Amino acid sequence: MIYPSNFEQKIGFTQIREMLSEACLSSLGRRFVERVHFLDRFDLVQRLLQQAEEFAHILRAGEDFPSQYYFDVTEHLNRASLEGAFLEVRGVYEVKMSLRAIRQALGFFVESEEDEYPALKALTQGVEVDRQLIAALEKLVDDSGNVKDDASPELQRVKRDLIGQQTQLRKQIASIMRHAKNEGWTPADAEPTIRGGRLVIPVIAEFKRRIKGLIHDESATGQTVYLEPETVFELNNDIKDLENAYHRELIRLLTAVTNQLRHHLPGLRKAYQFLSLLDFIRAKAIVANRIGALMPVLHKAPIMKWNNARHPILHLTLQSHGKQAVPLSLELDQEQRILLISGPNAGGKSVAMKTAGLLQYMLQCGLLIPVAENSEAGLFSDIFLDMGDEQSIENDLSTYSSHLQNMKQFVLFADKKSLILIDEFGTGTEPALGGAIAEAVLDSLHKQKVFGVITTHYTNLKNYAEKTPGIVNGAMRYNPAELQPLYQLEIGKPGSSFALEIARKIGLPKNILEKAGTLVGKEKIRYDKLLEQLEQEKTDLERRNAAAAKQERKMQKAVEEYTALKQHLEESKQDIIRTAKGQAKLLLKDANQQIESTIEQIKRSNADKEQTKVARQQLDTFKEKLTPEPKPVVRRNGTAPSGPLQPGDRVGLIGQDSVGELLAIKGKTAEVSFGGLKTIVKLEKLERPDPNVVREKAKKEKEAAAAVAPSRGLDVTQRMADFQYTLDVRGQRAEEALTTVMNFMDDAIMLGMPEVKIIHGRGNGILKQVIRDYVRSLREVASVADEHVERGGDGVSMIVLK
């Protein structure tokens, strides 16, 4: 039972029905939309939901399912059932194309996996389309709805002769028209036309006697007549005869194919019933995908366990404006049958109640509902609704009387399988009496074990729900600080109406507010204040929890990135060691081969003095190649020379341990060789190194040369020319970016760059922090700062080198 009679309009289902109708491809599906109604049979509801769920999956997967030519051919089939009748060409075309769509749909389910679409496959049982019938229809009409010229030999012959005669007629008419235009007998822009099924030419009325022929018609003004020249009489007659012959042959073919169709009418009606269902189910799936609907876990018993449920119409409306509806979660079962929702006006109470009613009604009409995947739903035998103003002048009913009339129906007919939906329970009369009657009705409904979603402002109903098992309070969340609704449903506590607070925000005079507070009583004020305080504390706690969770996620991500970076550096270290050991082994192998070669050479020459000297010289050259020894320029007393730097002096970069040889001086720049690497640096950045440092470094380099192969010579001048002062590491992971930055800074320091720039972006700040920590650890770096705000701000690091 659904109460009242205009339930669908009040709850918003008429808009859902309109959406379904618009989604249908033809009147086939729309007829099923009109027949949609509330069901309480578990097996039937489950089957309808499963069909819609399977078709929604087909659409989401982009499967190649037929979506054209869903023609309603009921009229054509009825005509074909009459003995001696025949279908028009349009009817043959629509039957042909729709039967093709049916065959494609059947083929889709045949080719799919055995258990992929069980509910939809069940619809195909007993549905067949005769191939010979489709072949006969294909032979007569093409895919554009035109009769094929080769439908029969006779039709082909007549069509060929007709085209030939029409071509000859047009040529003769064109010749007559040219002559008439040259003589001025016909308008200059005139063209041949058809009158009475015959080709004629327009002639100016005063010249109609100049051309022999038959006048078929004249213009509205009488200034032009339409004349069939005498010379084309026979051609027009022949064409008329051929057209009649063509029409007779076409009727014969249409009659034959209609007779063939008549033998398959029972099977065809079943096939079109299948096509109608497909159109309807497809429309349900399209609407379901639009509103994000799915099939919840279904139970036979009355139950609601909905997570993130959304009102479908509100969802689409807000979505069109770039907004999102706030979902609600509610639970009704045997232990918690009635939900009493309270809260401020315009806070979403009525929307929550209507969402519950609309979604339950949609579900029991076989439609998918917009809830989360882990939701559960059951079936109710009745749904009762009391919402809005139902006053009636004809029936002498006031608003409150209409509410009482509804309450009477609820109390008389509702039972433990009924769902009661009441908006603003108890309003419409004197508050004390209205609240008392509402509490008595609620008590009666509770004893009848009905299920329900009820909205109210009455405190006595909130108190009754608080102390009565089976009834639970719910509140629409509100921001007390800003006096703004949050549209969030919270189960377990009553909500405040915030009447005084809202009145204060609107600007009602203070003396009126104070008077209202006195009249309502301190107990009520304290009660609402407590609810307001609890709401504010909950809001603050949620905000702090959200901030803490965000910070925790940020820290966790930073720890993961630092751990990954440490692991990467450790792995890189091991790779470098393995590479160095490999190079050392190769170097040792080359050295041994060179020594053995030298010994062999001395043996072959029988220790000849000259040959031995040459062999030793080759060995010394090989040794010098492996261990280039620095040549510090120092005085005999161990002190460094003074005065200006000269080519050949040993020099070093200020603040660094590297020692090289000054090759040349060009103005304020100098060319220096560091271990075979040539570079150009500013002269002011060079200094003479401490002799003791030079000797110590030379000793270490000599010891290291025995294990590690020296670097090959490199033209650093070219590297300096190719050096890019800006490095962009946006989008890289921390460890990858740090490796790139290390190489970049090494080049910058070696080439003596005064300033460089690293672009790392803002993001969550992890990449920026890692890079700056490393750069600041370099003693060659003078400062690190943000770029100018117009050129990137804190997303770019400006690094000044010493």
Image: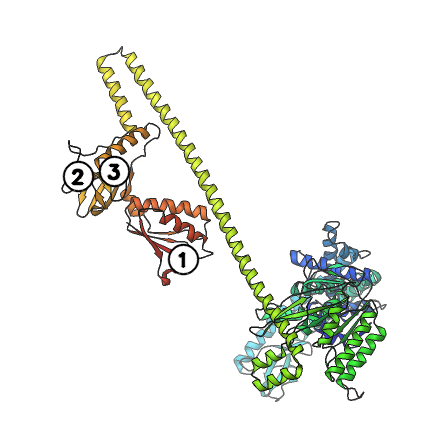
Q: Give neighbour class at mark 2: few <14, some 14-19, many 20+ (Cα, 10 Å).
A: some
- Residue 275 showing in the rendered view: yes
- Report the magenta residues as a range: 370-375
Q: Give neighbour class at mark 1: few <14, some 14-19, many 20+ (Cα, 10 Å).
A: many
Q: Measured along the vertical axis of the image, is residue 545 above or below residue 694?
A: below
Residue farthest along the front direction in this orientation? 522
Residue 598 on the magenta segment? no
Using the image as rendered, state which of residue 51 and residue 732 is in the foreground: 732
Rounded to the nearest angstrom, the CA distance separating label 2 from label 1 is: 44 Å
Q: Which of marks 2 and 1 is nearer the N terminus?
A: 2
The amino acid type of the residue labelled 1 equals Gly
Q: Mark 2 points at which residue?
A: 647
Using the image as rendered, state which of residue 616 and residue 248 is in the foreground: 616
Residue 189 location, quadrant: bottom right
Residue 144, image x and y in percent?
A: 67, 64
Disc sitting over residue 795 in the figure: 1
The secondary structure making up most of the magenta span is: loop
- Residue 215 showing in the rendered view: no
Q: Name the residue under label 3.
A: 659
The image quadrant where one finds the N terminus is: bottom right
Q: Earlier in the sequence, mark 3 or mark 1?
A: 3
The amino acid type of the residue labelled 2 equals Pro
Q: Which of marks 2 and 3 is nearer the N terminus?
A: 2
Using the image as rendered, state which of residue 101 and residue 220 is in the foreground: 101
In the image, what residue occupies the spot 82% across and 73% down? 444
In the image, what residue occupies the spot 44% across and 46% down? 736
Q: What element carries label 2?
A: loop
